[in-house]
Amino acid sequence: MWNVKKNSNIQKNLLAQLFKRVLLLYILILAQACTSFTADEEENGSAALSFNSLYSQIFEEKCLSCHNSSRKEGGVDLSSYDALMSSNVVVPYSSSSSTLFISVNSGNMPPTFTLSSDLKNLIAEWIDAGALETTDISKCSKPSVLLPRLTHFEYKNIIFDTLKEEIDLSELNTLPTLPPRYGFDNISNTNIDRVTAEAYINVAETVNDKILSSSVILNLCSASLIKDQHTWDNCGVKIIDYVGRRLYRRPLRFEEVNSYRSLFFATKIGALNAYGPSQDSDYSTFSKDFAEAVSAVLITELVSPNFLYKMEFFPEGFKSTEKAYSLASKLSLSLTSSYPDSELWALAANGKIQTESVLKTQISRLLNTYNSRFAHNFAGQWLGYKDNMSLGNDDLDGALARESDLLVQEILDDNSKLSQLMSPGYTFVNDLLANHYNLGSSPSDDVYTKISSSSRGGLLSLGHFLKKTSGVDKTKPVKRGIWVLDKILCRTLPPIDKATLEEIADVQTVIDPSASVIERMEIHRDNSKRCYSCHSQIDPIGLALENWDHLGQFRTNYSNGDPVIANLKFNGVLVSSPSQLAVSVQQSREYRNCVQKKLESYFIGSSPVQEPQCATQVTEDVPFKQLTSDTIFKFLKESL
Amino acid sequence: MSDYSRRLFLKHMGLQLTLPVLSNFYPLSSMAAATQRKNFIAVYFPNGSYFPTADGIGSWHWNDNTGVLYDLTQGADSVQNNVMILRKINAGRIDLDPHWHGPAAFLSGDLIDLSLENPKCGRTIDQMIADTKTTPIKSLEVGGPYFHIHPLADHPNYPDIYINRISWTDESTPRTPIIDPYVLFNYLFYGGSGSAEEIEYMINKKKSILDVVQVELARVSAKTSSEGKIAMQQYENGIREIELSLASTTTCTKPSLPTNNYENKDFNYIDRVQQFQKMIVFALKCDLTNVVSLMYGPGFSSELTYKWDIGFSSYEHHDCAHNGGNTSKINRLLAINKMQVGLLKHLLNLLKDNGLINDTLVYFASDMSNGDTHDITNIPTLLCGGGSDLKFGQEITFGSPQKHTQVLLSALSLLGVNKPSLGEDVMLATTNINSSIES
């Protein structure tokens, strides 16, 4: 009997368990269905802005008979996304510049019937949203993990900050140039070969001289010590540690100090044998053998991979116990181009830098305190004026570079919006520039005064860019147009292939060299579809800027008396002057997204030609400082 | 005689009679191979010369003073008998911009890889020659005088590295040229002045420093992923080359230290290159190296006006090449060409004065002929050296265009390296031009 009851209970339990499992299974199935439904819905909702949707709704049925991979009527192939983009008939974000939309909108295509307004709008909408192949962000590639090198600018700043004075470090100019990546050298990962290694050693020997001559260094050791009394313990290790932690952006490790100690003593003995005891060195109170020993270690530190490579940006570059220093150093190098200052260092030492609120506060503080360095390094490279910053204020190129630099600093200081980078309403002039621009006055070449101006000061009216993109005695509107497309809108023009070269050669034969600028450009555009696809983007910009001559001075006529005329549309809007162009650009999301892309390239080394659907969309006109803070915070947050 | 039948004897007598007859049709000198040289110097100059017509000689001649090569033939220090002009040499591919493609293919004949992430070229012939040498310095790369960054550098298809390098160890590793004479001096002749003990101490100190750096490289390498390991390995390779070069610095007589200011790339241009050339020749003489590549400027060279050397001009070099028929720009281009050919003359005379001319082959060429149209046909090309086995002092005009890689194959064979082919795509060469250049 007992067995029967027991069996009944067992059966009930089994049934109960079975029921629970079925219920659970049902819930899981239901959840999956909802997810699928949501995904489908999302897919359907976003499909209108992907190539596949256009293909299935328009191209496949209405266009592919002529524009397929074999026939390619008019050079246009709509059979795939890559084929379409290679046909050069789509300008992302600008349907008004895209031959594809222009053709269908005008009724020229398809040739035998007209597309409905809905379908035409679909094409325009797709192009204006960026002409994305897909909206699937699950496959967004991450920036390559590379080991970046310390730039010459960072090298210089670290030495300046270590010695607390701006000494002459012109020997850095003998170092091989660090080729920029995506326009920025701080993410350059070029390896150190023999020549570069030798150059670093030569520079280190000179920098070592300056370190040992510095009062900051001398003060590390007791003033009561005289020649021959300096030892590793009472002086040597202090110098080596003080310099080493700043160069490496973290505390020195036990094994490193041990190596340096051995090197110190070995060199000291060698120097004693070579020069004899109690010899004077070039460095005030130090004896020759002591100076040689410390020099050997300092030179080692100056050529160590821990100094010359930015290990903090590389996995395993810093130890797990050094994580806080790694974060502090990433932040510091990004915004100040130097090692963490004392406040940041303290926060790294106590680990507090690894909290979000502290990190945000420090980002804000560094942008406020070191805005000149950030402007110099980021904007200087982005806008191409950095090299000219070393020229004198009495040199036009030097003054123009400073004008650009001061604009960016002011935009940061003022918390101004991205649109104000284009139209700030002011510029900065020294005496030279004031005369050059015929604009206000300034006491001298060394003093830059902020001057109100409705036409000057924005990115597209900076004298630096206007002169740099001109010839010796005339403007080059095509070069200016390409610069703006590249730097301000992040548009990539297709490479010039053999067929295009041949078309260019053909078109050049029909262009009358005595025709006006605007006429020549028109013939160029109209005579070749290949030329049109690029020049429809380039020419409106270049022509709109023709009021600025080759030196960035304003004009209404060319030197031959012809009036300066611009009559083309940029993004569907007529731009007949520099200010109209500036307004059109500053209102575009493309411009805002481009600034974002440049910041991302600078901070994390991402390519400006990443998958379009993965690009961060800057939908509002935010302050430049805020965009910068947000971008670097997003990047550093991963290290918390 | 019994073993040597009369028939056989007469047969051999016939051969003896026949040989003198045959030799009249086939001069012996053309059958002998040219003498192998010990040293190789490749000299690159950018932007070509003035060629108003394709396939013409333009200003690239020495017939009279309208030619930029004329000065080679003049004066007591004439080097006409040490120079061979080669015409109808083509280089490159029409759809690749020669400002990038030209320097990269200059010694390799390889196509550039248009990828910003991963610039690739090909192993160059100077490195192939260097592989056969056992000198302390494997090869010397000199020139510049600056690293050209093109405004469209972040155009995703044309990385700057191609403009600035003519020597590549392998497809991914360009070799950096030394651009400062002081740096070159220190590199070749480390130790400066001082007693033998002091110099020995300094060398040992430097070696000790390098030892500790190598330890740190190994530590970093052990902890990082492949990308980090590659970077550390490259750095370590560079340090090892420096250590090898330290071994020989005490045995050679040094030239005097340069004295001018070379900070400004456009300043003291002629003196900079002459200093380079003096030190190069000393390095060859001292057997520090046998292989040198020298750039008279990077591709474009648009930051060079040479105004301190050949008079003021607002036109920079690249602008002069793209002269569009402008007479002022053409004249300036000719002046620049003459200046650079003058530097070649300086180099050849140094080689002669130091007894190295017969043992050295100099390849002197550009990346294009007519810079205005980026023409890659009929590239201005000179082979220089000494010896009667090669047609120095002559102009060789080929009946049909030859590839520059064929010239490079000849250079390789003259330096004792026999390769069946060189280059790729339209530049692939499987024959050399020895039969045309040998006396």
Image (cartoon, coloured by chain):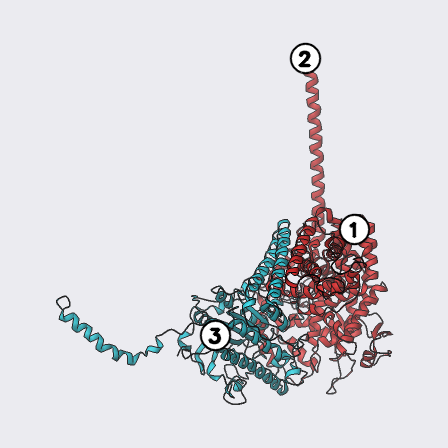
Chain colours: A red, B cyan
Residue denoted by label 3: B360
Judge whether B233 appears above or below B402 on screen.
Answer: above
How far is disc 3 from disc 2 in space, using C-alphas? 109 Å
Q: Residues within 10 Å of mark 1 (few under 14, many from 20)?
A: many
Name the chain under label 1.
Answer: A
Say if labels 1 and 2 share a chain: yes
Comparing labels 1 and 3, the label whose residue is closer to the camera = 3
Q: Image quadrant for the C terminus of chain B?
A: bottom left
Residue displayed at 85% across by 71% down = A425
Q: Is residue A340 left or right of residue B24?
A: right
Closer to us: A601 or A220: A220
User: Pointers 3 and 2 in contact (CB under 8 A)?
Assistant: no
Q: Which residue is mark 1?
A: A348
Which residue matches tag 2?
A4
Q: Name the amino acid type tagged 2.
A: Val
Using the rendered view, name the quadrant where residue A96 is placed: bottom right
Where's residue A135, x and y in %?
Answer: 69, 54
Q: Gap in Å between the C-alphas at discs 1 and 2?
A: 72 Å
Q: Amino acid at mark 1?
A: Ala
Does residue A626 appear in the picture of this structure?
yes
Q: CA distance from mark 1 to mark 3?
A: 60 Å
Is there CB contact under 8 Å for labels 1 and 2? Answer: no
